[in-house]
Image (cartoon, grey):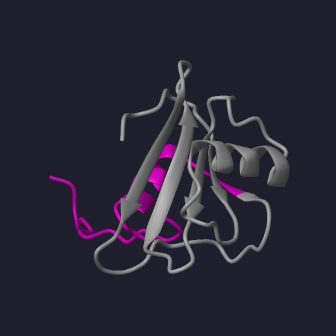
Amino acid sequence: MIAPPTGTRVYLVAGVTDMRKGFDGLAAMVAHRLSRDPFSGRIFVFRGRRGDRIKVLWWDGQGLCLYAKRLERGRFVWPRVDHGAVYLTAAQLAMLLEGIDWRTPQRTFDPQYAA
């Protein structure tokens, strides 16, 4: 995925989304379910029923971009909210796209002393 500008807001759209939807269907969901402008430059992330697929909708200033990803193993971590959206940082979005639990990332190395 092409990196969005610094300070771009990222929203996880709560609930389950029909992954057959494309640009227009997802933009309509943003406008009607969230009452937000899909052409605002914000990033909107949708998850399918099984949890192994997501779609990311983003207006880059020239047109809508649609990014899709399917995990071969595991599921994307999603909030337990039925409606609305949850705000993420760009770092949390990067972890989500890698299949990492963005809510409580674990360090792989804990330094014991400074050199």
Work out whether 115 lies above or below 37.
below
The quarter of the picture where the N terminus appears is: top left
Q: Position of residue 95 (x, y in %)?
A: 40, 59
Residue sitting farthest toward the top: 62
Q: Quadrant of residue 19?
A: bottom right
- 110 magenta-colored: yes
Left or right: where 91 falls relative to 26: left
> Considering only vertical position in the picture, is 62 above or below 40?
above
* Main secondary structure of the magenta stretch: loop
Judge from the rendering whether residue 86 lies leftward or rightward of residue 75; answer left or right: right
- Rendered location of residue 114, percent (x, y): 21, 55
The residue drawn where x is 38% and y is 68% is 100
**The stretch drawn in magenta includes residue 1:** no
In magenta, the rendered stretch is 86-115
User: Residue 14 location, x and y as percent?
Assistant: 70, 66
Residue at left offset 59%, top offset 56%: 21
Residue that appears at 68% across and 77% down: 80
Indicate whether 3 appears above or below 19: above
Left or right of residue 29, residue 44 in this image: left
Q: Quadrant of residue 9?
A: top right
Residue name at image x 63 percent, y 66 percent: 17
Numbered circles on residues, count: 0
x%, y% of residue 12? Answer: 63, 57
Residue lying at the far left of the rendered structure: 115
